[in-house]
Amino acid sequence: MTRKNSSILASLSLLFLLAGCAPSLVRSELYFGLSRQGAADVSPAEWQAFVDEVITPRFPNGLTVLEGNGQWLMRDGSLAKEKSRIVILVHPGTTDQKHKLDEIREAYKKKFSQEAVMELDESIDVQF
């Protein structure tokens, strides 16, 4: 575990200890396609800039990014197969957090001409 991850875990642990409650949180997964119609795929530099400028300011306590290969049925009925990125966030699930997730999805769709960014949310219990 990296030093940065250790300090994030310690901060979260302290937050839950001070709150005096069991750490019941929400795990959100965001699925970002990297293909663009009529343009080159989202480059690694463009992706990292999006993470740094859009996602991290809204969820500064940490996140996980996974690489993926997915497929998506387009509105026109064609099947798009593309590389993707999956961002995993663990958060309290407040209305403010949901608004931030919506902002991220909308910013990506607008910036990279995407039809959708899929979001999955589930309640989880976390132990450290």
Image (cartoon, rainbow, N blue to C red):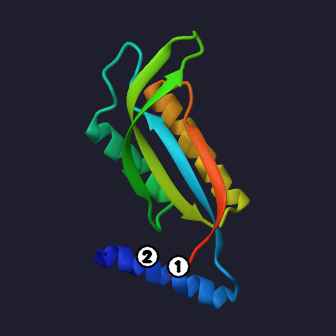
Is 70 rendered above or below residue 74?
A: below
Q: Residues within 10 Å of mark 1 (few under 14, many from 20)?
A: some
Mark 2 Cα shell of 10 Å, populated few (<14), some (14-19), many (≥20): some
Which residue appears at 28% of the width and 33% of the height? Answer: 43
Q: Tell me residue 67's x, y (percent).
A: 35, 44
Disc 1 and disc 2: Cα gap in Å? 6 Å
Q: Nearer the viewer, residue 31 or 107?
A: 31
Residue 95 pos. (x, y %): 72, 58
Question: Residue 20, image x and y in percent?
Answer: 69, 89
Q: Which quarter shows the N terminus? A: bottom left
Residue drawn at 41 percent across, 23 percent down: 81
Side (left or right) of 67 relative to 125: left
SS category of the residue bearing label 1: helix
Give how far across and how far down residue 119 sits, in percent: 59, 43
**Amino acid beneath label 2:** Ile
Note whether 43 is above or below 17 in the view shown.
above
Residue at (39%, 80%) from the top-left corner?
A: 7
Lateral position of residue 105 relative to residue 99, left or right? left
Q: Is residue 116 visible?
A: yes
Outermost residue to the right? 95
Q: Is residue 95 above or below residue 20?
A: above
Assign a secondary structure to mark 2: helix
Q: Are discs 1 and 2 less than 8 Å apart at CB? A: yes
Q: Is residue 58 visible to the viewer in this orientation of the structure?
A: no
Side of 125 where 61 appears, left or right: left
Label 1 belongs to which residue?
Answer: 12
Instruction: State which quadrant residue 25 falls in.
Output: bottom right
Residue at (27% x, 39% y) in the render: 44
Front position in the image: 66 or 97: 66
- Any mark on residue 8, and which? 2
Q: Is residue 52 left or right of residue 105?
A: left
Q: Amino acid at mark 1?
A: Leu
